[in-house]
Structures are given as structure tokens and as C-alpha cells.
Image: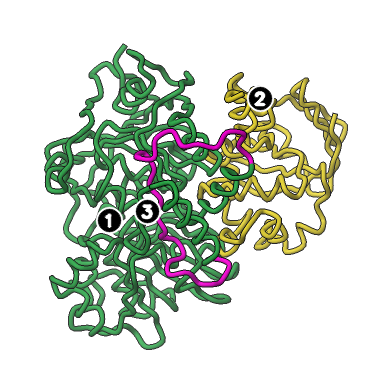
Chain colours: A green, B yellow
Amino acid sequence: MGMTIAEKIIAAAAGVDSVKPGDIYTVQLDHLMSNDGTTHLTVDMYNNKLKNPHIADTRKLVFIVDHNVPSDSPKTAASQKKMRDFARENNIDFWEGKGVCHQIMIENYVRPGQLIFGADSHTCSYGALGAFGTGVGCTDFLYGMVTGTSWVMVPETVKFNLTGKLPEGVYARDLILTIIGEIGANGCNYQAMEFTGEGARTLSISDRMALCNMAVEAGAKTGIFEADDKALEYLKEHGREPKAVYHSDPDAVYAREYTFDLSKVRPVVAKPDFVDNVVSAEETCGIKINEAFLGSCNNGRIEDLRVGAEVIKGKKVAEGVRFLVVPASQTIYRQALKEGLIDIFMEAGAIVMNPNCSVCWGSCQGVIGENEVLISTGTRNFKGRAGHPSSKVYLGSAATVTASAIAGEIATADRV
Amino acid sequence: MDKGTIFKFHNDLDTDQIIASQYLLLPNLDEMKSHTFESLDPDFSKKVKPGDFVVGGENFGCGSSREQAPGVLKALGVKAVIAKSFARIFFRNAINIGLPAIVCKDLPDDVKTGDTMELHMSEGTAVANGKTYSCTKLPEYMQNILNQGGLIASLNREEE
């Protein structure tokens, strides 16, 4: 029986010829990534709960401070110090303030065919380069750190056959929200979402990241693309080689198949308080906003900043609205500086901030107050996700978010 | 047999509601636990007693991978979480820290906050309002982790 890409990666990591969904295997992990959201707890457990504390292979580990950076309180600073000291003492790759963890991982570590655990739910982003990334908690992370391995239940794969090409003014962000709106917040629970077809090949690496990144918002264990020429080109540009390039077999078994025609996708918005509460962006036009956020591991890349800058060039942020622009990494920030995008945003009245998770995770910067409304390119719109429990979060594309910042209410880019 | 009071929550209950981002970098679970379910019921941590149960609907624990979510529930003494289905990271985290996460398809719709429930873990049943419900068995691998008190306890045993 044939296997899917996700199954082939697990089989290789388990050292077996074939696997099938539901089987549980011990697997070798290629990388383990942890950020400041939980690492202080991992370090405490390492020091206090283990009988024999040791690290299997420090080269597999990556620690990234990205959630509350720079720190926002003495307690945060203490938690981050614990992480920083541990990384230094144990010779672990350590990044601080350089970018959102998944962007750092894609730019510097991820290779096709790898199996990567990250102590962050959006680790599923790595499928953009044909790797199997999945989110875990800090206990799983600790186990992986000590043994270099973990246990995995092989997920079923769901096939998303993409046809056509996204129209002008419609983005991968609209596509993934459309898909989640259709299949639901648990539409692929415990499963792998494989994006394939001629439509998939039209998408850039940044687009693929936007898709895979939100697989977890449909409950999926991972989202994954085949590593095609575009992925290999990206790797080459970043000085890396694939571990292995896998293709799904023609007789691979899928739990379900969906077809999405990209040419029919339109701008959409996810309304509070669930990511699958997706409607046409038109339907939400006119809703007053207090803040707009362009950034995050989902939509803070150079491509997204270009879209935003194009929309806002020569225009102004509406009075009383805060427009936060947060490049997802310093590499992106510096590229945006070179291209003059940061000037455009600042000229328009935006607040440009250092790369971090920002208001997408509702702590650190840009948190919104009682009854305030945010439109965001972030990953989630749960109740209180961006601040006060009474506040509301709408999710849209870089174009819709920027247009809304100009209008002071939710607006599509063709209206401003 | 374990007996306790039910605290009932909605479908797609996300981990931000269990413990909000702003508390995650506090030094430890003891400092975080008073903020459990704060957005939905600010007094939850005062009302819940060791041995009580959290009951959810479909997709319980969706969203963030924060292990602090099952962590604060366990720190407050919650005996088990029962739901129609779980989001995978929450499910895995709960088992890993030794907090039973139990799938029971029929019970959640029949109960409300304040009801009393009995959990018969070894038989795989729960009793509420005079009715007995059967729960889904965990895969053996995960049951073993739970039986040993979580993944770290199991790792320590492996390394002996």
C-alpha cells in the first residue's frame, strides 16, 4: 500500500519501511524548538524532576525568545533569564529578538523530509518546505531533549487538491481562512493536511507557510506540501540541502479529499470568537476598529508587508486607530527597510515594532482594552486572545487589515 | 471510584480561556492557577475543589500548545477532564502530565455545572444524575504513560 508524504517522514524517522494511520512509533527527531512561552517550565522540570538530567544532542535544540520580547515585566525577565542561562550553559542555539520562532526556523533550520517538534502549536508551518512539524507541550519537549526521540501516532492524511490561481487582491490568507471556514475548527483533528495539485504549485513559500501555519486551527497535527522546485530553490538561497524529498504515492490512502478552486476564493474575514467563523469580507465592512495588526508567523513576511505598503502608500491611518506593523523577522525588517516599505508605513502613521509575536498572542505589546476591536493578520481570534475578555478580534488578509487601518472600520482594499 | 462536582464548558473551548497568555510567563503553575478560566468565570479557582471534574464538548482544548492549560487544572486538583472530543495537543499534554483526558460522547450533553459525577476509571465508566456512561478506552501506549503518573515519571523509570 502506498504512503503519503507525512507517512513517509514518520516511517523514516521510525526506521521502518512503512507505517499506517493509528500506529504508534518511537521516532528520531531532527529538531526540537522551544520559545519563551514555556521554556522556563521545561528548564525547571529538567533541573528538578529528572533522575538523570542530560541532553541527547544539543545540535537538535533551538531556543527562541519571541513571545514577550523585549520583556514586559521583572517576572518575564526572570523567566527569560532562566532560558538564556540554560541555553548558554548547555551550548544550545539561542535566538532573542531576531524574529518569530517559526520564521527563524524556516529561514535557518527546516529541511524537507525532517520531523520537527516545537513547543508551539504553529510548528505545523514547516510543511511549507516539505517537513513534518508539529506542536507539543513542554513535557514532550523535555522528553525529546533528553532522549532525542519521541512517540508519534501516525495521523491519517486529508488531501486538499488545489486548482487554478488566486485572483489579484486575494491571498493565501483568504484561502486558508476559507478552507477552515468550510471544514471547521476541528475539521482535521489529529490528521495531516496535504496541499497538492497545480494550484499548490502556483503558491510561493510565503503562501505555503500561511496555509500550513493555520493547519492547527483546523485541529490538524501538521500541514504539508511536497518540496517542489520552488521549495528547493528557497533552500538553496538559504544555503541548505534537503534531508529527503518525498512524494505521496499514487495509491496512498487519504481519509478524505477536498478540491478548492483558487480562482473562486474571495477576501474573507473570520469573526470573533472562532477561527472557523468565516464570512465574506464585504459582510463585515463598516465595523469600527480601534487597532489593526499586520504581522505574526502567519502573515508578517516581506510579501505581506509589500501588500500592506501598496495599499497604504500615500494614505493615512485613520485618526484614533493604532496600526501596528511587525515584521516576522529581522531579515524581513531589513529587507523592508531596503525596499522603502518601513518609510511608507511610518509616513502613513503606523507604529512599526521589533519582530515578535506582538498582539497575536495577547501579551507584551499592543494588547487591546475593554470592548476594543482589533483586525489582525494573526493566527487566532479567540475570546480575549488580544487582551481584555470583552475585546473582539477579526482576522483578515494583509490587504484587508491595512485597508481597515486607513478606513477606521473594516474595509476591503478596493474601498480605500 | 472518584466522586466530584462538574464544571461544564462549551464546544471548541480554547486553551486561552483555560489560562490566558498574560499569565504564562509567571514563574510556576502555583502562581498561574488562580487565573484558571478567568475570562469565563473569575471565581473558578475559588469554587473548584480537589477531585472535581471539568466537562467540555467537542474539540476541548483547541488552540495553543501551552502545557500550562492542563497544568493549572491539575494544580487545582481537577481529577479528570471529560469531553466529547479533544484537540490533539491538549490531549497529549494532559496525558503527559498525568491528568486523565477522557472521551465520553454522551455524558457532556446531559450534565451541567454543579452536578455530581462519579468516575470509575478502571471500568471506563462515568455516572451522573443516575445514568451510567461508557468512556472510550485510551490506546495502551497512552494508558501506560498515565498509569505511571505521566511521561517524566515514565522516563525516569526507563532511565533507572
In the rendered structure, the residue with mark 2 lies on which chain?
B
**Residue A280 found in image quarter:** bottom left
Few, some or many residues within 10 Å of mark 1 (<14, 14–19, 20+): many
Q: Position of residue A27 (x, y in %)?
A: 42, 25
- Front residue of B156/A355: it is B156
Q: Which residue is mark 1?
A: A266
Spatial distance from mark 3 to mark 1, Cα to Cα? 40 Å
Q: Which residue is mark 3?
A: A94
Look at the image and tell me whether residue A217 can be seen.
Answer: no
Asked if residue A295 is positioned above or below residue A214 in the image, the reply reads below
In the rendered structure, the residue with mark 1 lies on which chain?
A
Circle nearer the N terminus (3, 1): 3
Q: Main secondary structure of the magenta part?
A: loop
Q: Position of residue A48 (x, y in %)?
A: 63, 44
Going 37% across and 88% down the picture, which residue do you hit?
A319
Left or right placement of residue A227 versus residue B148 in this view: left
Spatial distance from mark 2 to mark 3, Cα to Cα? 42 Å
Helix, strand or loop at disc 3? strand
**Residue A58 found in image quarter:** top left
Asked if residue A390 is positioned above or below residue A36 in the image, the reply reads below
Q: Amino acid at mark 3?
A: Phe
Picture disc at residue A88:
none
Look at the image and tell me whether residue B153 can be seen.
Answer: yes
Q: Which residue is mark 2?
A: B136
Going 35% across and 49% down the picture, which residue do you hit?
A93
- Front residue of A373/A123: it is A123
Q: Is residue B126 magenta?
A: no
- Front residue of A38/A364: it is A38
Q: Which residues are magenta?
A: A49-76
Left or right placement of residue A242 versus residue A99 in this view: left
The quarter of the picture where the N terminus of chain A appears is top left
